[in-house]
Structures are given as structure tokens and as C-alpha cells.
Amino acid sequence: MFPKPIEKSSRSIQLGYQSLLPVALILWLLPLIAVALFSVKPAGDFSAGNYWNLPSEFGGWENYGKVFFESDMPRYLLNSLLITVPTAIGAVALSCMAGFALGIYRFKSNLWLFFMFVAGNFVPFQILMVPVRDLTLDLGLYNTKTGLVLFHIAFQTGFCTLFMRNFIKGLPFALIEAARVEGVAEWKIFVYVVLPLMKPAIAALAVLIFTFIWNDYFWAVVLTQGVESQPVTAGITSFNAQYRAAYHLMSAGAIVAALPPVAMFFLMQKHFIAGLTLGAVK
Amino acid sequence: QQLTGDLKIFSDMSNPAPRATMEGMAARFGEMHPDLNIELTIIDREAYKTQIRNFLTANTPDVANWYAANRMRPYVDAGLFEDVSDVWEGQLSEELASTKGAMTLDGKQWGVPYTYYQWGVYYRKDIYEELGLSEPATFEEELANCQKIVDSGRTCYTLGSKFLWTAGGWFDYLNMRTNGYDFHSALLAGEKKWDSEEVRATFANWRTLLDMGAFIENHTSYSYQESLPFLAQGDSAAILIGNFAVAPLRDAGLTDDQLDFYQFPAITEGVAMAEDAPTDTFHIPSGASNKEAAKAFLKFVVSAENQTMINAGDALGQLPVNSKSSVDDDKFLKEGFAMLSSNSPGGVAQFFDRDAPAEMAKVGMEGLQEFMVRPDNLDAILARLDKAAERIYK
Amino acid sequence: MTTTAVPPTTPEQQRRSWYKRNEIKVTPWLFLFPAILFFLVYVVFPILQSFNLSVYAWDGLGEKEYVGLDHYRALWDDPAFYISLRNNLIWLVLYLLAIPAGLFIALFLNQTVTGIRLYKSLFFFPFVISQVVVGLVFTWFYDPTFGLLNSVLGLVGLGPINVLGDPTYVTYGIIAAGLWPQTAYCMILYLTGLNAVDPEQVEAARLDGAKGWKMLWYVIVPQLKPATFIAFVVTIVGALRSFDLISIMTNGGPFGESRVLSFYMFEVALSEYGFRMGYGAAIAVVLFMIMLCFIAYFLYSMYKDQKGH
Amino acid sequence: MSGVTLKNVIKRYGDVQVIHGIDLEINDGEFCVFVGPSGCGKSTLLRMVAGLEETTEGAIGIGTRDVTGMDPAERGVAMVFQTYALYPHMTVRDNMGFGLKMNGHPKAEIAEKVAEATRILKLEDYLNRKPSALSGGQRQRVSIGRAIVRGPEVFLFDEPLSNLDAELRVEMRVEIARLHKEIGATMIYVTHDQVEAMTLADKIVVLRAGHIEQVGAPLDLYRNPDNKFVAGFIGSPAMNFLDGTIKQGAVEISALNGSFKLPLNTPSDGTEVSFGIRPEHLEIDPKGDTHMVDMTEALGGVSYAHLLSDTGEKIIVEERGDDRSQEGARVGLKFPVERAMLFDRASEARIR
Amino acid sequence: MSGVTLKNVIKRYGDVQVIHGIDLEINDGEFCVFVGPSGCGKSTLLRMVAGLEETTEGAIGIGTRDVTGMDPAERGVAMVFQTYALYPHMTVRDNMGFGLKMNGHPKAEIAEKVAEATRILKLEDYLNRKPSALSGGQRQRVSIGRAIVRGPEVFLFDEPLSNLDAELRVEMRVEIARLHKEIGATMIYVTHDQVEAMTLADKIVVLRAGHIEQVGAPLDLYRNPDNKFVAGFIGSPAMNFLDGTIKQGAVEISALNGSFKLPLNTPSDGTEVSFGIRPEHLEIDPKGDTHMVDMTEALGGVSYAHLLSDTGEKIIVEERGDDRSQEGARVGLKFPVERAMLFDRASEARIR
Ligand SMILES: Nc1ncnc2c1ncn2[C@@H]1O[C@H](COP(=O)(O)OP(=O)(O)OP(=O)(O)O)[C@@H](O)[C@H]1O
Ligand SMILES: Nc1ncnc2c1ncn2[C@@H]1O[C@H](COP(=O)(O)OP(=O)(O)OP(=O)(O)O)[C@@H](O)[C@H]1O
Ligand SMILES: [Mg+2]
Ligand SMILES: [Mg+2]
């Protein structure tokens, strides 16, 4: 292990390290801590110029109450959920199948198809902007969650397929052969042998996609408008427009918007990091 | 007659006060037509500007907000706005005479206005009094005032130019006062060169202000709302803005004793005073499905009674477009109304980004902002604007 | 050698259905079909369409008008394009700082004291948060009057700096905000990479007398090559895609000085004063071409990798 | 009858031919082992029999059927993999019953067959465990059980024991021998391990670079190899080979400092030959002085003396008993001439 | 002089003690091999000598220096790892020179020392390759070269050959023996492999669960083990152990169906003992009728007969020569009594 394990160092170094950790963490997360503090400050603190001191009193209930009951935030949150969850399911489903095909079967265009997905994953998505917007308009899906979901599924399929294909490639091929020798039909191999083994990858990927999509802003702006279909990232900007200079409310809003992926991250932390590892460092 | 079906309205009145006004207006119209199902969608004002293209072509509402003059031209040209000349027929034309021109393109009317508002200088009366200043009538007085304010450790004007258009307001006024309304509108219509004596004179005046430190320093970082606290807290003495700023300033704690208004002072002698008074409008997209109800709604919007109500100080706090309606008993509205009706012989402009084509407005306002930060770049900026103009007005 | 005879084929073989006989050949295509369909419709065709669109003038409303390479010619002497391009290069270069920074934090956290897992995830936190929120937070951080940055600078007698309002600082200010989550991302990549460092090599190097920086430089960093590679790729991609932060923090300003290509094309094509679709597409094509270098590099190394196995 | 017949079987990967026309007959119930150096095509050949690799040319028959183009499932074969290839998410019971279940056999029948295999392999205690909770040997037993359940005509094993440690390997080897005795099916077994090949096989097939070098019973190959390759490959430590030349009906071997008349059809004078003799057939003559003891390796009951002839050729001699030679000593060598073999140096063919 | 001295060395991981007070003296130039079952602490002990693990208690000396608290780099040791631990991004040359470079030696000196090690290990042709372009044996050779270059007083090897295949293992083993002879440094070597331990060691240390069971020359351990553990551990196939009881000064062994008087200090009557005899010391008496031949494994020169006594105990017998027993036959057993050993069943100590 590098660097040298700290427990092998002298007592004072250990103590130094232990106390440096929280300090470093606070510095690192300073901007977030500030927002958290902002969000529980009463409005008066800002007009009094009390930006960076502790809140004069706890104003969190009021601020969050405003966010939840006097704005469209709940609506935006719901939209985000209705966009994110189907996308995660769809992208994972498509990429499981594609990954299976690319990871298990040998055929001529295999590598090229795979590269197509990988390359698609890296294109600057702005190049898709105008045509995709037109396509969505033509399909009558402009400003619908469905339109956003369909596009996200398609675009995420690149990354997910890369991820799944690598994962499946890492499975022992002998398992597939064993099943073939036993006369198991190919689709049954997928369902009964490969899918159960992909559970960790599926979990990891689902979490990853969840955060990616939840945090998407660009496509939300390009493909949707208005409170009935925009997700919370776009919502927060109109929220901001509405409450400009009301930092306590904006902070509360920002925290509300950031919370679901953060919660997801903490709940599924193991999968999430495993996911990054599986998908990336492999 | 009784209206039925759905009426879909898209609105950009997203700030708290306008939003409530819009919702109230929709509700009242709904009460008049119980069988009509009104769906009101309110979209963030900045976002609305980019989204209108999309919803005019797909997912079309029956009524939509927009702006008058050049700003509506692309949609008129593309056939996306319905010709509503029939709504204007009859007495309405008289009642709305003052804004009819702004709604007319190619001899037809393409929507109705619902509000307009004056621009001008909103200032801290208490500070002026403290320093012994009075409302300036000429640029010289203005500069003298400003010097005293600067000497007192304040800035003369607060400004938030992050979203550019506030700089457009400054140019409008400086140019209209320096060169007059006709030159200004010709310039924005692409008929005059930016690199001209006249425009340079305007910028020279502006530069005088810049050089004396009249503006707050970091205006590029702020939206106009974010720039208001400087005024509210007394760090700046005034702001050049539209009347919509009154409500947030009052919210920020300024009383009518502290806040006052004056018309932007004259610069070049003999140039008639002209004002910016942007008109906000309602239109019917040509793809609307319930045009009958939409037209009824438009008529309702401009009716004298409704105009009085929605432009009241506790609502939009702006000027009604219907000559029959009454201006609210609000000192700013009264002052503005008086100014526009009797003291702007030069004409009424819509606003920089409504009078110039969108693309030109963008490039132009960027140049204006750049000028405010780097006045020495003026030559390059003017050259750039002329080059852009060449392409855009082609 | 023995000579042997193989018995004849039984009729059973012909009885099988066509699908059964070609199962292995057909199955992958059935499984690939939906993904390919989605991908073609939403990714591949749109790229081609963008190429096509870049030779038309179109305001998104009326008829398209063929203009040939005019847009590219216009780009050639569009100062805004050069500013965007310059900023893109600055982004590319400075964004890469996330890699050493991430490595540094990863090394700092690569210990096994109690609670380190929590620390690791908290350090990773910024990556989970939407860039929109990050942008907001940093906007406040930079605020010239009340922002924390200027408060701190004020304490040591400097400033105030109007980071986001000053054309000389604005791009760097946004990049700094972007580096925050990106560093967290690189950190996690390196943490997993460090996990995979062969402990025996570290021990061998200790026996060889390598310590501290020498150990890091000669033994650890080379072993972290895969992590570095991925970090490099995601950072480049992130730098070229940067949009959210610019849009939230400055909207491209002041006077367009913080634009990058991706933002510029959005502005040109879809923003309030824009709707020059063809011109936007032309910018997108240029951006795509830049990215293509990296994609090609990435695919090439992957190809080599595949051949290696 | 369910023997396996290969007829002129050829395998090409693209342009690379890895199996060069193999003809082979494996009788019903026979235990056939493929050996050969790494990369010689053992696995490929086995997988062609299984149907996991396509047969480029030639024909494969199992029992009375030509299975060349058939799917693996239809061939009536079962395969045991080096890595066990157990489904990690299923219990031992489900692993064994999976194939039958997928092919729609009734539950009762599956249960019965699994029970039977479980009995044979003594897996009763583990039926409800997942593979991860089993030791390597147990896993391999389950994977054999899975093969048994399907009641195949032919069992295929690809280095089934090479992932086990030495002790377990011995144990499982005995197990497989017992299994073959008990169910009597035809088995084809690929291995690297001399001991496995020698002890398990009824018939060993020695492959080299996609060709069959020799086929025969283990001790036949050991005692009577057809060529130098087989002679060197079978037996450990490997046979010593010394360069020799035929002179007047005898072999002149400079490394042995002598000329020997062997009881075989000595080729014509001047033929260059390789003289082969196994370490265990050599005996050290402490009184001799033809060789130097370069090194000795004492393993307890047996030691190996590495001798260096004056020509620089190395010779390994097995020593038993209590007297072992000392390093550095000079010694002579004795051997019974009938144990020596002669190979043509050019063609490597055995001279008998 | 640079021997290695361990004095009451103890290692604890937290509360778990894995090395229990080891005293050991390894002389200058000696080749010392640690053997023992998996997990007994061989690697831990070696790594403590290297300085890669801290010594919890006790002292380690190299030459005349007490190195207990020193950094690995200062101890004058070099280590060869099972997985080679070559730096994959450096060429062979750089790998070998890395240690000197890190310690600031001049380039010329490094080049010279690398050249010397290259010569010893015959690596000339590979100097500019990366490790990934080398075979396993070559890699291990480079890793030994890396150790040589540093000119250490003590070489440490942790199962250096266990990742190689059988053939290469034999070859490298010989190489290491030659190396030891050539440079004459002290070497400590950990292995699982009987053959390596027996052939390489000057001194074998048998470890069990963190204790030393016996220390001695290979053949001493083979011929004269101190206890049942060592007797069973050294030698392959392992010694046969049969339960016996002392009756009237003789050992009664039911599995052998007889009572034997052994030439040793027979313990008192009624003592339960284990009777040990190696497979190679047993001889099958085809005329006897005490055992059943359960299975035979013919390996060519030697076969192993697995016998089953009537009590069900298993006995392995080594057979050589041309006559081998048949499976299923009933046979008798002969052995020279002086080869048999006796162990106390409870304490496992040897009874001499
Ligand atoms: N998919 C493939 N494409 C090209 N060549 C291949 C392929 N699979 C195997 N080969 C080649 O075929 C030859 C035989 O391989 P095979 O796996 O049958 O050897 P083996 O005898 O089983 O070796 P080992 O003992 O190492 O398992 C090798 O030279 C190998 O390189
Ligand atoms: N870091 C550690 N923490 C706790 N116990 C450990 C640690 N490292 C090793 N052990 C324990 O110490 C004992 C000795 O381990 P060691 O690796 O020395 O065994 P070994 O004899 O080398 O085994 P093998 O032959 O399998 O390599 C084992 O029981 C092991 O579980
Ligand atoms: Mg193989
Ligand atoms: Mg070990």
C-alpha cells in the first residue's frame, strides 16, 4: 500500500493525520457548508449583511417551507424523478442486452459496433442539440418527459454499453459454454445465467445513471420548458430568477435539488464506487 | 357569448407580483366563462425568451406573452402569430391608439398590449437631500450632482449588466438625448453606421460618466435584481431602470419618501426628449386551437376595467394601455404617465433589444457592456458592430 | 493411424427450425437491436444531420437555405469564435489540473484509519452534486461584495476581485469551480487505482530504497496508468463539454469573454437572441472535430488493448 | 455404443490452422487422455468434440450419429471445465438441475437425477450451499455432478484438476478414476499433468502442434514410444538424449565415451542418431571415471544426479538406496542395453 | 560474516499472534529453506527478516548488526517475490538498476553491476525488453538479477517458483542452486514444494503454526524426523501412518495384521503409538494375503499401489521394476523393520 500506512508511523504523526482529516474535509466542502448555512438563515441576516457568520436564528423551517409550499419545487422534484427513474431502467435494460451481445458473441462487426457506442459516449453532445430538438419536435415529444427520457436512454446507452460489455466480458466465458453444452437456449442463458450475475453491475450502473440524469441541465433546457415537464436542475434556475438575491431561499432550493442524488449516493455508496471502478478503471 | 373548450395560456410573468396578477386575471376571465377550461403555464421570464420558438411550432398554446415592435417580427414573418386586426376593429383602436403603432407590422395588428411602463432615473431622495442636490434637468447638472455623490463615497448609479439589457437602457437614453429619437431608431434599424460622429458623441458622454466613477464597479457580475441592494442600502444614489423595479425596491424597505423619480436629463440642446416605454403584449399563435376564446381573452385583457386593475400599484404597478382606464394613485405611475403623455415630444421607443433585431441586439449590448468595462476598446467595438450589422441587416 | 468411418447424418438435423439452426448468429442481433435503434436515431443520425445542417442557413422557423461553406467562412473571422476557442484551450489545459489534484487527495486519503470510508465519500461529494448547484455556490463564493473569497482577501488586505465580472479572470474562475467536482472524480479514480497497486512492487521498491516522492514517481504513478488514462479522458471530455457552469455562472459574459465553443453554439442556436441553427451546427462540427482527436486516441488505445488480449 | 470418432478433423482460425487433420477412434467406455505441450491444440480438439468450436473440415461422430454440425446440447456430451464454471448464484442443487430444468424436464425427474449424482459424488451435505461456500475440490465435484445429471454418452474434461492444490489434486484424481469405473461412460480428458495422464488413461493421445504423435496405453507409450518427442514427453524426469553415430552396426556415443551394440535393427553406418535412456535405467558406477557429478538433488527416497559428460552433455541419473553420489566426484555409468532406445536424429522417428 | 540470527522473534497482528518466539541461526553462506503448511507463518517470518513486517518482539541480526528496527533498504537484504514484482514500465535493465539508481550510485557503476548480473543469469538478449515481453521463467530470472545487482548480504525468496509451470520450475531450481554456489551469499527460501526444499536446502526449517518443529539438513529430516508432523510433511508420497499399540515390547498393528519388534526404545506396554513407514520402504509380497490392492497408479518407472487393509486403513506402496501388482489382487507386505518409525500418538513425538 502506498503511501506508507499511517498506523505504522509514530504516534504524533498519527494524531496529526487524524486531526488534519476533518480540517481538510471542512476546507474541501466549505462551499457546501456555506450553502447549508445560508439555507437556514433568516432573510434578515442577508439584508443586515450577515453573510458568512452563523445564522442569527434558525430560519430553516421557514425557508424550506417556502421552497416546498410556495414554489414549484415539489413539481420539479417529481418531474426529475419521473425522468430519472425510467431513464435509468431503460438505459440499463438496453445496455444489458447490448452488452450481452457484444460481450459474449463473436461476429465480424462486434468490435466496430462496440466502438460506435464508445465513441458516441464521448461526442460533445452539443452536436446533437439541434437535430435532436427537431426530432423531438417532430415526434410531438417536445416538452414532455417522454421526449427527455427517450433521448437520455439513447445517449446513456453508449456509456452503459461500454460498462456492461466490459463487465460481461469479465465474466467467465466457461459459464456460457457450460450452459450451451447443457442445451440452454441463448435467451435463457441471458435471463438465467448472465442477468443474475450482473446484479452488482446493474446496481452500480443504475446509481450512476441516476446521478448523471438527475444532474443534467443542458438537455432539460433544450428539450423541455415549463413546470410541467422540466426537471429540478432547470427548475432551480427559474426558482433563482424568481428569488434573485434571496440567498436563503436559493440555498434551500439548491439543497433540495441536490439532496436526492446525495441520498442515493450515501445509500448506495458501495455500488456507486464499485460502479465507477467497474466502468472506468477496467 | 359563452365560450367552451380549453384555453391554453403561456405567460412569462414569473416574478412574484406579475405572477399573481396574471393568475388573478386568468381566474377572473374564467369566472366570466365557467365552461371554459383555462390552463395557465407560467415560465421563467429569461427561459421564456428561448422557449417561445419551440412552443409556437409544437405544443402550441392559444395565447402567449411577448413583446412589441421588432421583437415580434420573426414570428410574424414566419407566420407563427395570428393576424388579430379584427380584435382591434372599432373603438378599441381608439382606446389603444398610443400603442397601435408598436403592434402593427405590414399594416396589420398581430397582438394586443397589456402594459407598458416608463423608464427613467429612480433615485434616493434622502441622499440627494442630504447632499443638497436636486433633480437634474441637464447633463451638466447631472454631472455636477454625480461628482458630489462620488465625493461622498457613493456611486451615482447602481447597475446590473450581467444579462446585458440594462446597458442597452443606458445607451438608449444617452443616444436619444445626444442624437435624438430619429437617429436612434435609424441606427437600430440598421440605417446608420455605428462608427459615426453621432454615435461617438454618445459614447463620449457615457465615458465622462465612466471616468468619474459614476457606476458601481462590479455591475457585470449582477443581474438587475442583484444590483438593487446597492440602492436600497444607500451605496448608490440612483438607477436607470423601468418602473417594474419599484416593487422590489419597496420590498427592500424603501419608502416613497426615500425613493423618487426623474426624467433622464437633456444632453444636446434642442433635441426633443424621447423615452423608452417598452410594451408587453399578448399574441395568438397561428397554431392555436381555440382562437375564438383567445380573441375574447385578448379583448378582455385590454378592456379599460381590466387594464386599470392589472396595472394598479398593488399588481403590476405599470401603465395601462387603454386610454379609458385610470392610472393608479401611485406617485411613480403618475409621474411616468405625465412624462409619457406630455413630456416626450421626441417619441417613444420600445427598448434597445426590441427595436433592433435580436441578433443585432445581442452583439450590440455585448459591445455596450464591453465599453463600460474597457472604454478604450471603443474603436474595435464600433467596427465589430458595423460588421455584424452589415450581415444582419442584409 | 487408424482409419475410421463416421456414420451418416440423421434426419433429426433437418427438422430443426431456422431460428434454432442459426441461434448463435441471430441472437446477438436481436439483443442489439433496440440499443442500436435508439443509438442510431438519437446519436448517429443527429451527428450526420448536424454536418448537413452546417451548410444551410436556418432560423428554426422558416425554410432552410443552402449556403455552402459560408458558415465556416464566417467562423473564420468571427472574433467570438476565437474567444471561445481560446477559452476552450484554457479549459483543456487547466482542467487537467484535476488529475494531479485528485491524485494528491487520493494519496492523502489512502489510509486505513477509522472512519476513512466516510471521509472518502465526503470528499467525493462535490461530484454527486449537480453542476447547476456548484455554479450557484461558486457564484456566491466569488461575489465581489459579500463573497467569501473577497472577505478572505480583504482580511489579508487584498482585493476585492470581481472574478466573474472581469474578462481577465472569469474563465479561470469558472474553471476553478469546475475543478472542484472534477478533482473529486479523479480522486475516486485514483483511490480505486491505488487499491490495485501491486503491494509486492511497493515492497520491492522499498527494498530498493525508493521512498516518498521517488517511490511515487518511479513506482506508483506508472502503475496508476490505467486510472490516469481514464481520468485524462473524462477530464478532456468534461472540459470540452463544459456548459452548465458557464451558463449558470456568467451566461457567457462579461461580453462573451467566458464563452467556450459548446456554450457559444448553444447561444447561437437556441438562446434568446440566437436561432442561427446552421451556424450553430458549424460550431458543433468544429467542436466535434477537436473531440474526434481524443475519441480516436481513446479508441486506438482500446483497440490495442483488445488485440493484446 | 457411444464411442467418439474423429475423421480428418481440421480447425482453422482465419488463416491459422491449429488442428491438422486428426483421425481418432475412442471406444465406448474408454478413458482417453489428450496430452501435449501448451498450445498444441488439446483444448481446441476437445471443444470441437463438445461443439463449442466449429469444425472447419472433417467429421465428428458420437455413437452412431454424425454430430459435426450439431449444437453442443444435441450431441449428448457433458463438459467439465478447468474453472468449474458453476453458476455462482445458484445452489449446488440448482446448478446440477439447471440443464434439465431449462429443457423442460419434470421436477420429479430432475430431483431424482440430482439425488443420484449427489450420491455418487457424496455431495449430500452441500446441496443447499452456493458454490462460493465450497472448497475447490468440492466445486469440481459439483461440476462433475452437473455433467453426470444429464446422463451424457461422453464426458469431456478440460484440465479439471489444474486449479487445485497438490493434495486435493491427488484426491480428485482418485475420485475421477472411481467415477469412470462406476458409470463406465466414454471420457475424454485433457491434462498437462504426467501423473494424471499415466494413472487415469486407458488411452493416451500425444499431440504436437495439431498433429497426433502417438496413441496408446500409458505404459505402452512409456515403454515403447514411436518417436523422440513422445519418448521425451512421457516420463519424468524426462529421458536423456545423447547424440550418437552409427559405426559398424553399433552406436558410438561420445558422451558415454563408448560404442554400444543395441538389440535392434541398427541403421546403416554414418546415420546420425539420438540415443535415449531414462534416468531410472541408468546406474552410477562409482568406480568409473567418464562423468563428473555436477549436482545432486536428494528427495529422500530417491535422488537425481546431474552428470556432465566430458563432451558437455548433461545426463540425469536416478539413484535410490542409501548410497548416493557426491557432487564433484567423477563416476562411470552403467545401463542395460535393452532399455536404451534409438531415434533418427533428422526425422526423430524411433529406430527399432 | 553475514549470517542471520533470530532471537525469540514474535509477531502479532493486533491480538493474533502468528509467530511464537522463534530462535534460529542461519550461518553465513547457508541456504536455508522454510517449509510448512499454508498459513504457518513462513512468509511472515521471511518478511520480518526483510523488514517489510515489523518485529513485535525479539531481535533480528544480520551479520554483526542488529537490524530489528531498520528500514528494509538498510538491511543489506534483497528479496525475490512469488509474483516477481518487476516494475512493468521499466526495461529489464532499468528494473535491475533501479535500486542502485535510487540510492544515488553513479551510472557507470550501475551499468557494470547490471552487466555482471546479466552475465550470471544469461539475460543479455532481453535487457531492453519490458517484463511483459518475457516468459515467466525469464521474469523470475530478472527479479533474481535485480536482487543480485544490489549485492546484498542476504537473499530472501518467497516461493519464487510457484508461479512457473512444471518444466520451468525444474530448470529454475537448478539455476538457483547454481547461483547459490556461484555467489555464495546467505539465502533464505520459502517454498511449498518438497522437491525444492529437499534439493536446494543446506538447512530446512519446518514451521507449524508459528513454531519451529525441527531444523536440520534435508536428508536428516527425511531419515530422522523428530516428530510425526515432520515425518509426514517431508517425503512424497507421504509416510504411511498406522495405529498401533505396544504389547510386550513389540508394536501390534492391526492394519498389518501383526506385531513387530522394532530396534528402538519401545515404550511401556499399552502406549498408543503411530507406526510410520514410507511407501518406498514397503514391498509387496504377491504371495501374502493381508491387503487388497484398491488401485494402482503407474507412472512409468514407478507405480503406487493403494492398498486397503482389512481394518480399512489405507497404505501406499511404491513399486518399481517390471512387475507391478494388479488392482483387486490380495497381497502381503514386507518391510525392513529398521526403516519403520514410532511416534507417540498423543504427543506426536518420535520414539527412538
Ligand atoms: N480464437 C483463436 N484464434 C486464433 N488462434 C487460436 C484461438 N484459440 C486458440 N488458438 C490457437 O490454437 C492453438 C491451440 O490452442 P489450445 O487452447 O487448443 O491449446 P492447448 O493445447 O489447450 O494449450 P494449453 O495446454 O495451454 O491449454 C494455440 O496455438 C492457440 O494460439
Ligand atoms: N495482515 C495480517 N493480519 C492478520 N493476520 C495475518 C496478516 N498477515 C498474515 N496473517 C496471518 O498470519 C499467518 C501466517 O501467514 P503467512 O502468510 O506468513 O503464512 P505462510 O506460511 O506464508 O502461508 P502460505 O504458504 O499460504 O504463503 C496466517 O494465519 C495469516 O492468516
Ligand atoms: Mg487448453
Ligand atoms: Mg506465504
Image (tube, coloured by chain):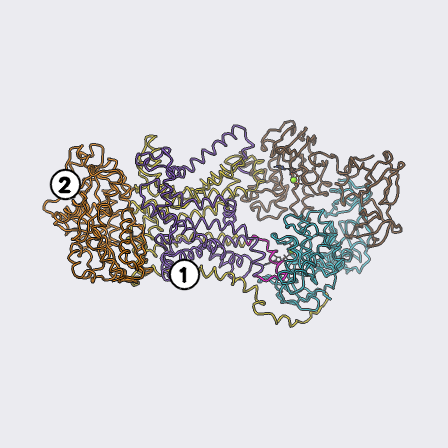
Chain colours: A purple, B orange, C yellow, D cyan, E brown
Q: Few, some or many C-alpha atoms within 10 Å of disc 2 (few <14, some 14-19, many ≥20)?
A: some
Q: Residue furthest left?
A: B270
Give the dominant element type of the magenta stretch: helix, strand or loop.
helix
Pointer 2 chain: B
Q: Secondary structure at mark 2?
A: helix
Query: Residue E30 in magenta?
Result: no
Report x, y in % for residue E334.
87, 46
Q: Can residue E213 be seen here?
A: yes
Circle 1 or circle 2, nearest the eye:
2
Q: Secondary structure at mark 1?
A: helix
For the record, the magenta segment spans: A168-186
Residue shown at 47%/38% (left/top)?
C105
Q: Which quarter of the rendered image does ligand 1 occupy?
A: bottom right
Q: Give left or right: position of C19 versus E221.
A: left
Q: Classify mark 2 as within 8 Å of ligand 2 or not, answering yes or no.
A: no
Label 2: which residue? B139
Query: Residue A185 in magenta?
Result: yes
Pointer 1 chain: C
Q: Is residue E296 above or below residue E209?
A: below
**If the image is split into quadrants, where does the C terminus of chain E sit?**
top right
